[in-house]
């Protein structure tokens, strides 16, 4: 699966929320996400542009691998593999026993909205501020999907600089 997404810092998250709802988007859930990122003992994920993440919320825990990023039309494109786990503590013990090292924890409040086949997330990230992400998961043409994400951003009045850095990268770049 390919994840095609744009991320933009927003000054008024409420205005974006109103636009999503007025266009027919539906709120599916609001969660607090605690994302623990790990680095591998055999290669530096900061250099290879990969990510291994354990996401814990009030209702589920998910292990995610993200492959290196590419960019098309201002959208970030990368392979994403997800696996739910009922036992996040054991996952953490396994990977740390194998030499993986926790790098940082990113905490955010996220509102998930769905519109057509898009997921639109409104994020309040501790230490970083407010963001909107528009995401499309596809197995098809990445360029076509990126163009659709771009069209959806325009429809939702999401303007501003598109950020391809992850929240982890943004947090780690703070002096």
Image (tube, rainbow, N blue to C red):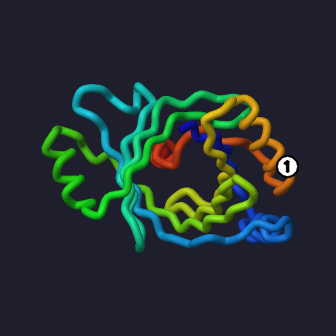
Q: Secondary structure at mark 1?
A: helix
> x, y (%) of residue 44?
33, 29
Local crowd size for mark 1, using a 10 Å CA cut-off: few (<14), some (14–19), many (≥20): few
Question: Is residue 107 positioned above or below 163 on the image?
Answer: below
Q: Which residue is pictured at 58% across the width and 72% down the height?
A: 29
> x, y (%) of residue 87?
25, 62
Q: Which residue is pictured at 76% across the width and 32% down the height?
A: 144
Is residue 49 among the parts visible in the rendering?
Answer: yes
The quadrant of the image that shows the N terminus is top right
The image quadrant of residue 114 is bottom right
Is residue 175 among the parts visible in the rendering?
Answer: no
Q: Nearer the viewer, residue 50 or 80?
A: 80
- The extreme left residue here reads 97
Give the residue at mark 1: 154
Q: Which residue is pictured at 74% across the width and 43% down the height?
A: 161
Question: Is residue 103 positioned above or below 78 on the image?
Answer: below
Question: Is residue 124 positioned above or below 92 on the image?
Answer: below
The image quadrant of residue 6 is top right
Q: Exactly how many numbered labels are in the figure?
A: 1
Q: Which residue is pictured at 76% across the width and 66% down the height?
A: 25
> x, y (%) of residue 34?
40, 62
Q: Is residue 21 left or right of residue 93?
A: right
> x, y (%) of residue 97?
13, 44
Q: Nearer the viewer, residue 32 or 119?
A: 119
Q: Nearer the viewer, residue 15 or 156?
A: 156
């Amino acid at each position: 699966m390919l994840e095609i997404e744009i991320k933009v810092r927003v000054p008024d998250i409420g205005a974006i929320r109103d636009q999503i709802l007025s266009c027919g988007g539906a709120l599916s859930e609001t969660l607090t996400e605690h994302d623990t990122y790990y680095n591998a003992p055999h290669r530096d994920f900061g250099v290879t542009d990969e990510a291994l993440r354990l996401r814990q919320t009030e209702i589920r825990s998910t292990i995610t691998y993200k492959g290196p990023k590419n960019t098309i039309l201002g959208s970030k494109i990368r392979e994403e593999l997800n696996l739910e786990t009922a036992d996040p503590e054991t996952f953490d013990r396994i990977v740390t026993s194998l030499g993986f090292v926790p790098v940082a924890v990113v905490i955010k409040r996220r509102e998930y909205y769905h519109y057509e086949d898009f997921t639109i997330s409104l994020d309040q990230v501790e230490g970083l501020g407010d963001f909107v992400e528009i995401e499309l998961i596809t197995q098809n043409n990445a360029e076509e999907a990126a163009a659709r994400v771009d069209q959806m951003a325009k429809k939702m009045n999401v303007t501003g600089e598109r950020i391809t850095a992850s929240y982890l990268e943004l947090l780690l770049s703070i002096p």
